[in-house]
Image: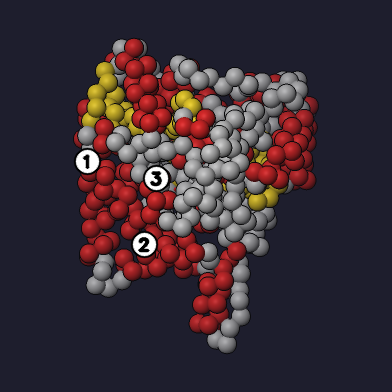
């Protein structure tokens, strides 16, 4: 089997681009580097590598240049304090951008242009970020490999015969390949953390409600969260800080004041860390090893590290594959040939609806709609949906009990390193199992971060997952940063 080679970070070998976003923003604000020059680096890298990788559904050459010029002009005029001044960013293609296609990588929305921006887009623009393009994904965010996209799969930049993970595979690959320093994705059951892990970048799934979902095309509304991708913990933390604001357009939005950003005072030597032991037996050797290595580093700093068996989490995946499809079957009912996107004509309205949905949706989306409709149908609701909701409560309670004892939990992000393209498409169940370790967090609404931790089988990157209680992002970020600094496999380019 082929093996991985670390791709260069953003700007490597292309002029004076520092390795972190915050340093780059400072240079832009001082007028020492122009937003236009940074954009040029991004567009050039995309031109060089994306033909093969396919991480972008759309690159916004002209619009991005206009936006970069605006940032440069306001800096020349006397200053601009935007926290992401001049930073190119890639946006997952299920996040609405006004007048710019937002396809969810589906044929049904292939030509749809939203009439409004998602709240996160408005925010990113106001902070001076330059939106470079829309990234490829599994259709409607259903998948773990970015292979269900109507626009063809994205390839893993470490090894182009492998998947980048999914569903936000385009965003993860764009950052991993150095096309952009930052990207955003969405995580319903692992779609930020799992591709981050498989592509060797950092990904954060925030606490449910911390980041506005207004303008995110809904998959499973009680689980969906938007979050950041970056090549290091600091950059991901900076982006999360920008994304975390109260939004009255999202009824589940939390107050920003509930979230403590930046430097919290944490003494690692007083931390209690639990390794989720029942996750380990089915993890690949390198994924298991990453957890053992991280535990040793934390113990060396004085943290108390224990193993904890949280058996309720083993049922999370079964409950998720009832709850998420159930919500999806309801959310996707709006794609009916009337209100959005594709219409295939028929003799009457019903035939038009059927033809539109038959042609517009791919196999996996249809599978989810059928599963969800079945689980919600009269006579089966109690047997499936209600039971799944009960498991969701058990999972939440089990986590909360564990957080009574531990400050944070550790696990691999994914059971394996990136797998070969095509190897799981014919077996949905094995694809679903890629999210074994990420799904429980979504059911609980808690935050988790995936940080690259070592190189595993076939020289592919391994991700470590840090999980914490609601609104513990600052703690997770701080510990992830410490582990990043003590990771023997440091980024060397
Ligand atoms: N892979 C999971 C699924 O297919 C999670 C997807 C996601 O987080 N969007 O549902």
Q: Of the residues under marks 2 and 1, which one precedes in the sequence?
A: 1
The residue located at (74%, 32%) in the rendering is 41
The quarter of the picture where residue 131 lies is top right
Can residue 144 be seen here? The reply is yes
Ligand 1 closer than 8 Å to label 2 CB: no
Say which label, 3 or 2, has the lower sequence index: 2
Mark whose residue sits in front, 2 or 1: 1
Which residue is pictured at 58% across the width and 35% down the height? Answer: 158
- Compared across the picture, whether 492 is left or right of 468 comes to right
Q: Cβ(mark 3) to ligand 1 < 8 Å?
A: yes
- Whole-angstrom CA distance, mark 3 to mark 1, is 16 Å
Q: Is residue 407 left or right of residue 194?
A: left
Query: Which SS class for mark 3?
Result: helix
Disc on res. 311: 1
Few, some or many residues within 10 Å of mark 2 (<14, 14–19, 20+) = many
**Disc 3: which residue:** 435
Q: CA distance from mark 3 to mark 2?
A: 18 Å
Dot 2: what SS?
helix
The residue that appears at 42% across and 38% down in the rendered structure is: 416
Instruction: Please state which of residues 186 and 383 is positioned toward the viewer in this rendering.
Output: 383
The tag earlier along the polypeptide, 3 or 1, is 1
């Amino acid at each position: 089997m082929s093996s991985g080679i670390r791709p260069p970070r953003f700007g490597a070998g292309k002029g004076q681009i520092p390795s972190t976003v915050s340093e780059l923003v400072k240079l832009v604000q001082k007028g020492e580097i122009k937003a236009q020059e940074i954009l040029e680096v991004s567009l050039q890298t995309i031109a060089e590598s994306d033909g093969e990788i396919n991480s972008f559904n759309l690159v916004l050459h002209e619009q991005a240049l206009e936006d970069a010029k605006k940032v440069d002009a306001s800096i020349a005029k006397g200053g601009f304090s935007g926290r992401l001044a001049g930073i190119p960013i890639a946006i997952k293609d299920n996040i609405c951008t006004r007048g710019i296609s937002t396809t969810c990588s589906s044929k049904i929305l292939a030509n749809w242009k939203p009439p409004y921006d998602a709240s996160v887009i408005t925010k990113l623009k106001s902070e001076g970020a330059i939106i470079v393009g829309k990234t490829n994904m599994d259709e409607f965010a259903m998948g773990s490999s970015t292979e269900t996209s109507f626009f063809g799969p994205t390839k893993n930049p470490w090894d182009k015969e492998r998947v980048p993970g999914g569903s936000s595979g385009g965003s993860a690959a764009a950052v991993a390949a150095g096309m952009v320093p930052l990207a955003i994705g969405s995580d319903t059951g692992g779609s930020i953390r799992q591709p981050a892990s498989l592509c060797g970048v950092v990904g954060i799934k925030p606490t449910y409600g911390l980041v506005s979902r207004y303008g995110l095309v809904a998959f499973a509304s009680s689980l969906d969260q938007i979050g950041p991708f970056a090549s290091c913990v600091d950059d991901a933390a900076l982006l999360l800080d920008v994304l975390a604001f109260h939004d009255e357009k999202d009824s589940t939005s939390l107050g920003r004041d509930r979230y403590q950003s930046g430097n919290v005072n944490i003494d690692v030597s007083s931390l209690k860390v639990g390794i989720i032991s029942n996750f380990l037996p089915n993890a690949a050797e390198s994924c298991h090893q990453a957890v053992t290595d991280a535990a040793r580093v934390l113990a060396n700093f004085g943290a108390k590290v224990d193993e904890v068996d949280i058996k309720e989490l083993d049922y999370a995946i079964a409950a998720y594959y009832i709850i998420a499809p159930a919500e999806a079957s309801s959310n996707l009912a709006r794609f009916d040939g009337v209100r959005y996107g594709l219409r295939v004509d028929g003799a009457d309205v019903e035939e038009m609806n059927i033809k539109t949905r038959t042609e517009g949706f791919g196999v996996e989306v249809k599978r989810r709609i059928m599963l969800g409709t079945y689980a919600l149908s009269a006579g089966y609701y109690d047997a499936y949906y209600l039971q799944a909701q009960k498991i969701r409560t058990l999972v939440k309670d089990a986590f909360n009990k564990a957080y009574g004892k531990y400050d944070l939990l550790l696990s691999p992000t994914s059971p394996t390193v990136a797998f070969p393209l095509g190897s799981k498409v014919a077996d949905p169940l094995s694809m679903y199992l890629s999210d074994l370790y990420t799904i429980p967090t979504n059911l609980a609404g808690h935050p988790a971060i995936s940080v690259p931790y070592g190189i595993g089988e076939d020289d592919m990157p391994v991700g470590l997952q840090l999980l914490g209680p609601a609104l513990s992002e600052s703690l997770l970020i701080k510990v992830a940063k410490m582990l990043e600094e003590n990771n023997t496999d440091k980024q060397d380019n």
